Image (spheres, rainbow, N blue to C red):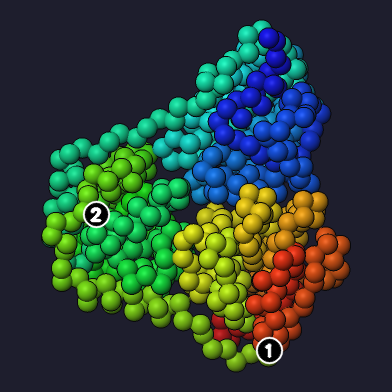
Amino acid sequence: MQSTAGQVLADALSANGIDRVFCVPGESYLGLLDALYGRNDIDTVVCRHEAGAGFMALADARLTGRPGVALVSRGPGASNAAIAMHTAQQDGVPFILIVGQVPKRDLRAGAFQEIDYAGMYGSIAKWTAEVTEPERMGAIMRRAVEEATSGLPGPVVVAAPEDVLTGVVTAAPAPNELRAAPKSPAAPKPGDVQTLRHWLGQAERPALLAGNAFDRPGGREALKQFAEDWRLPVIVSFRRQDLFANADPLYAGDMGLANPDRQMAALRQADLLLVLGARLSDITTQGYAYPPVPHPGMTLVHVHPDPAVLATRFAPELTIACDPIALIAALGRAAPPPTGRDAWIAGLKAEQKKIAAVRRFDVSDGIPFELVVDRVGRHLPRDAIVTVDAGTFGAPVYRVIPFTPPQRLLAPISGAMGFGVPAAVAAGLRAPGQTVVCFVGDGGFLMTGNELAVAKQRGLPLKVILSVNGMYASIRIQQEREFPGRAVGTGFDNPDFELIGRAFGLAVTRLKTVADLDRLPAILSSPGPQFVVVDTSVDAVLPPRR
């Protein structure tokens, strides 16, 4: 039976469990859109901007473990999607960007809206491909899924000329020929396992740094069991607070943008640091200062499925290129369980509790957003999904809300603004029975907030909490530190957000005073969509005047 290359592409998505795609249509991939017509196995979500479509795909990938897929047109469409490509690379999220390309005869001729995507995305994408023959579509899509999901997950690009998408494939591949076989990381060597068992048993002040390799089915459970079996305090990497119950006595906090000196002084007393499934980036290591570069001054063990991220700046005592969950299984339980660590674990927990404590504020210019976050955090359902945009308003989310699996946190590791609303819409589509709460600022909301049109169309009961302060506050804070009293380029005027919320079909509430926070529990438990506009204090976050 004959098929088009566009139909083979759609079949490949379905064969790999990808049941939803996010798109902004373009004439350069009409053949693929036609192949999606009438399919019950793939939901085509129509978006208003390629950045939003890409962010929605990334959030969907975080929730499913499968590659998120965005479909965009050539040139401007692909350029608009670049922020999602960068976010996927920084966050380690499997993502496939499918780009409709100029006709095959016009390739490399400087045609209208043509871009060489291998050159454009070369430093971001794990792999790029251009399908120039219809018969190659199946093999290229299979590899695209394999590349996106293997080792350190990340973004891939598949560009297909418009006439190739409508080209006939004489022998359509069977589903098993389209199904990816991700490269399995090597199993840990028995000698490395025994060495690590010995070190873990002997360490007096060990610490475990857990990363996004645990962000998959069974990962959180495996991490919890391992930490309990070996009596290991757990630190999570940047914006991965949902990997481990924050109220657990073994939870020692996260590696954020600037951890307090007291906490870092305590962590530097560790005699063994076991890094499982996290990259030792500048943020994870506090500017490559924890542990010190290159010789850590403690026993450092780095375990990651991608050998390319091991021993880049640091000189660990042991590196193991394998799946951290496979390593945990190989280590088994401690026999006998280590003892004598109670004071060490309690000390780290005490520092974490100080960081999580809600602060007192003496301001009169609005509501300190930390109080909003605290009130929401105390009333989150056990299976809630929280999405967070980038900005100062988001900082208390990572400190104050006591995330407990299966609650989920979707936030951009890359710090990309505009992520929050698209992520919330994608979460609402993927988990229609769960509460989805989006925290977003007035800067990021106007970058991508139009995805609320999808929420309105699909009837999603999102809870959007908008912090309004009329400025890019995270930049203003740094501006006031570096150039006090010389603010420029960080303030702006806002439209009528209440009117915007109603236009998207949400019930609107405005919070102006701290007393208004008593309305939040009822808003969160409401069955319908809610849009909460918060008059947020600036004085609560700006540094003291010199």
Q: Position of residue 252 (x, y in %)?
A: 35, 69
- Residue 313 seen in this snapshot: no
**Would you call the spot at circle 1 few (<14 residues within 10 Å), some (14-19), or many (20 or more)?**
few
Tag of residue 251: none
Instruction: Reply above or below: 215 against 97.
Output: below
Q: Residue at x 55, y 76 (%)?
A: 378
Residue to which mark 1 is pinned: 515
Tag of residue 300: 2
- Give whichever of 367, 221 is nearer the camera: 221
Q: Which residue type does callout 2 highlight?
A: Leu
- In the picture, residue 448 is in which quadrant? bottom right
> Which label sits in the foreground, 1 or 2?
1
**Would you call the spot at circle 2 few (<14 residues within 10 Å), some (14-19), or many (20 or more)?**
many
- Residue 99 seen in this snapshot: yes
Q: Which residue type does callout 1 highlight?
A: Ala
Secondary structure at numbered mark 1: helix
Q: CA distance from mark 1 to mark 2?
A: 49 Å
Secondary structure at numbered mark 2: strand
Q: Residue at x 56, y 85 (%)?
A: 544
Q: Position of residue 356 (x, y in %)?
A: 45, 77
